[in-house]
Amino acid sequence: MSGSDWHDPFAEDPDAVERERRRAEREARRRGRRQSLGEKAAAGAAPAQTPPAETPAPAATQPPPTSEQPQVPAAAEPVGPNIPPAETAPGGSPPPRPPARGPRARSSAMRNRRVIGAILFIALLGLVIFGVVKVLGKLTEEDPPAPATTSKPAPKTTDLLIVEGLTREQIADEVAKNVKGDYMKASDSPPKDFDLEDYDAENAPNLEGFLFPATYPIVKKETAKELVSQQLEAFRSNFDGVDLSYAKSKNLTPYDVLIIASMIEKEIQVPEERKLAAAVIYNRLKAGDTLGIDATIRYYLGNYDEQLTQSELADPHPYNTRVNPGLPPTPISNPGVASIEAAANPAKSDAYFFVVKPGTCGEHVFVETQEEFAQAEQAYQQALQEQGGSPTDC
């Protein structure tokens, strides 16, 4: 066919050029989408690799259409989402497509992930339960027996009772078999942690009155000094809790209250009479009269059993309260807390005398006048002569 016979269809179909241009643009867009999908797959979770797009043969290699066979442009292939247009590979067969990742593939992968997650959760839960069982097992196990200690057992103690109203000399006789050392020497002066000035007793010749009566636990090798320290601590604990405001209002010192309490402890056996006996002492001190308490004479003489003679009653030593007005120089016994409280807070009474009541166990008659006292004294002396001794019935 000569060049003059070749007929250009574009000369006869002016729209063909435009259709060819649009087809070329569509091909370029398709190649761009395929390239973009390839880059996303490489950066994502390993989608199937897409074979490199082939460049279509240039239109110049195709034989030009003749006028007898007009060129019909190829229909555009449908292009859906993520579906590249079909291309013809060399040799006429279509190129291989990447495996489809539709809803079914995604659903299967999701199920696989859920199964794996459930297996991991069950395994982790089993480990937790195993650990809890182990911990509970250790907590419920019995503790192993404690190793035997080599420490010495606590020393065995013995209760030592010191009753109210004893003098320090009488206490020394009572504890001689229970403590080591000289109790009289140990009770001559206080230890450094006990200050007699706290009780206005800095001039006290010894600790008479401060040796508090109580039950003390002592060890086998207890010393007299250790026992005295316990008694002083008990005294401080009990005496410091007594209200001394009334006694102070009568110009009485703590040591004066202790002296009054020591006389009450020696004279009175019936608890209800303690405050009445204290009232008699307060009333006679206020009047500046003698107290007439024979227990002070007995303390000086050390005579607690025999009847006092007239010469002993008349001897003007400092402890003779029949002769000397006021209080004796020191306590005459070691009183308990009941007598101390009575001495600090006497009964409200005008009683001025008290005399032993015959036929009783230590009871007294409390009277106000000299005439009443004379009658009570006569009854006591008559019973004393008839019985040849103390007219008490205990």
Image (cartoon, grey):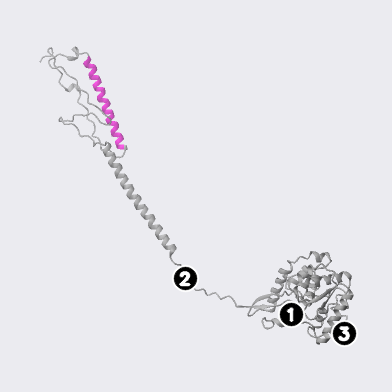
Q: Measured along the vertical axis of the image, is residue 177 above or below residue 144?
A: below
Q: Is residue 107 magenta?
A: no
Which badge, 1 or 3, comes first in the chain's sequence?
1
Q: Quadrant of residue 136?
A: bottom left
What is the number of the mark on residue 310?
A: 3
Q: Residues within 10 Å of mark 1 (few under 14, many from 20)?
A: few
Which badge, 3 or 2, comes first in the chain's sequence?
2
- Could you say where residue 206 lies in the image, as x and y percent from the top left? 77, 76
In front of the other: label 1 or label 3? 3
Amino acid, disc 2: Pro
Q: Residues within 10 Å of mark 2 (few under 14, many from 20)?
A: few
Q: Secondary structure at mark 2?
A: loop
Q: Are marks 3 and 2 in contact (CB under 8 Å)?
A: no
Dominant SS of magenta comes to helix
Q: Measured along the vertical axis of the image, is residue 162 above or below residue 28?
A: below
Q: Is residue 320 visible?
A: no
Dividing the image into 4 quarters, which one contains the N terminus? top left
What is the number of the mark on residue 145?
A: 2
Q: Residue at image x 17%, y 14%?
A: 9
Give the CA separation, mark 3 to mark 2.
77 Å
Disc 1 target residue: 185
Q: Secondary structure at mark 1?
A: helix
Q: Quadrant of residue 194?
A: bottom right
Q: Which residues are magenta?
A: 15-42
Left or right: 202 with respect to 152?
A: right
Q: Secondary structure at mark 3?
A: helix
Q: Is residue 385 visible?
A: yes
What is the number of the mark on residue 53?
A: none
Amino acid, disc 1: Lys
